[in-house]
Amino acid sequence: MIVDIETRRLRTIAQLRAFVEGNEAVDFQPRDRDEAYGFVRDTLERFAYGRLGRRDRGVVLRFLVAATGFSRQQVDRLVRQWRETGDVRDRRGGNRGRPFRRRYTPADVRLLADVDEAYGQMSGLATREVLRRQFEVFGDPRFARLAALSNGHLYNLRGSPTYRAKRTVWTRTQPTTVEIALRQAPDPQGLRGHVRVDTVHQGDRDGAKGLFLINLVDEVTQYEFVGAAVAISERFLLPLLEGLLLSFPFRILGFHADNGSEYINHRVAELLDKLRVERFTKSRPRNSNDNALVEGKNAHVVRRWFGHDHIPRRFAGDVNRFAQGVLSPFLNFHRPCLFATEYRDAAGRIRRKYLARDVATPYARFRSLDGAEGHLKPGVDFQLLDAAANAETDLEAARRVQAARRALFRLVADGMAPAAG
């Protein structure tokens, strides 16, 4: 920035000192580099810089830094050039360096920030799948360049100033010794319909219990349904659990839980028998991976959307309507998930790797399974599911869920606010 022509009325060192100390009001206007150099030269000549004492020279230099926006080192170089040649010129010559042309524009970076804000900043592979689908599936031309964004450069863009400028209590389950369910690791053998379940508690406050979130995830497709209950007693849990199990578009073949007594009991076993669930298993001791899938979803999905703060039980109905009616369809139709490819290493151990080609939404994953249509429940067909999946773009769906989430938490916050006295 170069000061306006009014600065030329500054004729004494005292006036300059008042300016740099902030006591002199001066308007700023942008100028190009050549005019900036000319301003530096005129200032040095006007104040006879070569005859000034050390303290006064410092005032002039501080003034030039403030007036031009140049660094102190750059101003020192220009002053040295003036003392040696009597002039201040651009010494870069005709072959001046030019920056590489940027492939991704600031608008692309802001669009990426919009996607991350809507989705809560997922992993790079999952975010790339959203960008690709927005362009290739939903035909949004704004994503033409981002659709081919590499995983490494995605994180570069997330670290850019443009991106940063755009972006704003667990409880232990009690062990049980009831001999119900098989103590085995879940083993779907590549078949959909083997779900894992876990409970998330929204904290206590002032002795009052918060509501409970129930999370069910299919192991093969990562189809996921979330619901909310006032408590995890039979009265509240069983109706919610039955509704969530019936929400899956395919029949449930297996049900796996940890050793919490809310699931390992005779009433849940009777419910699963009623729904003709063939396999009921529970986690083995000292085998933390048995229920790792749903626990990972608790951290990266449930906690991301509901947080860790206390939500009173009286809001269970409102939270449940949001979780089942808004969030769960979004998770299944519009939120990409990573699926592992297993391989055996040189030592014979089974390893997993996550490839970009394997990133897909749970519905797309289910759709891609061999004989998927034969796995649908009676009364459900792909025409109906495709219509739901394509009713809006991934980004539109994410923004709608964010808006519904904000409205929900405003309702909770207003309900928890102390009454005006």
Image (cartoon, rainbow, N blue to C red):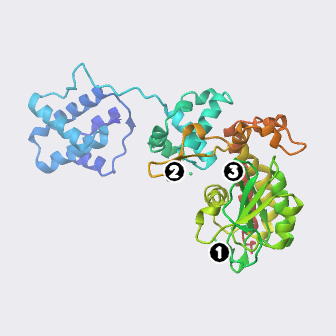
State which tag comes first along the sequence, 2 or 1. Answer: 1
Q: Which residue is mark 1?
A: 172
Q: Are marks 3 and 1 in contact (CB under 8 Å)?
A: no
SS type, badge 2: strand
Rendered residue at 48%/43% (across/down): 158
Disc 3 vs disc 1: which is toward the camera? 3
Rendered residue at 23%/34% (across/down): 40
Distance Cα–Cα, label 2 vs label 1: 31 Å
For residue 351, the mark is 2
- 156, 288: nearer the viewer: 288
Q: Which residue is mark 3?
A: 189
Inspect this view and state whether residue 12 appears.
Answer: no
| 52 left or right, relative to 365 | left
| Residue 399 in picture, x, y percent from top left | 68, 44
| Residue 269 in picture, x, y percent from top left | 83, 67
Rendered residue at 81%/47% (across/down): 250
Looking at the rendered structure, the kind of residue marked 1 is: Arg
State which tag comes first along the sequence, 3 or 2. Answer: 3
- 86, 19: nearer the viewer: 86
| Residue 143 in picture, x, y percent from top left | 59, 30
SS type, badge 3: loop
Q: Are marks 2 and 1 in contact (CB under 8 Å)?
A: no
Rendered residue at 80%/53% (across/down): 252
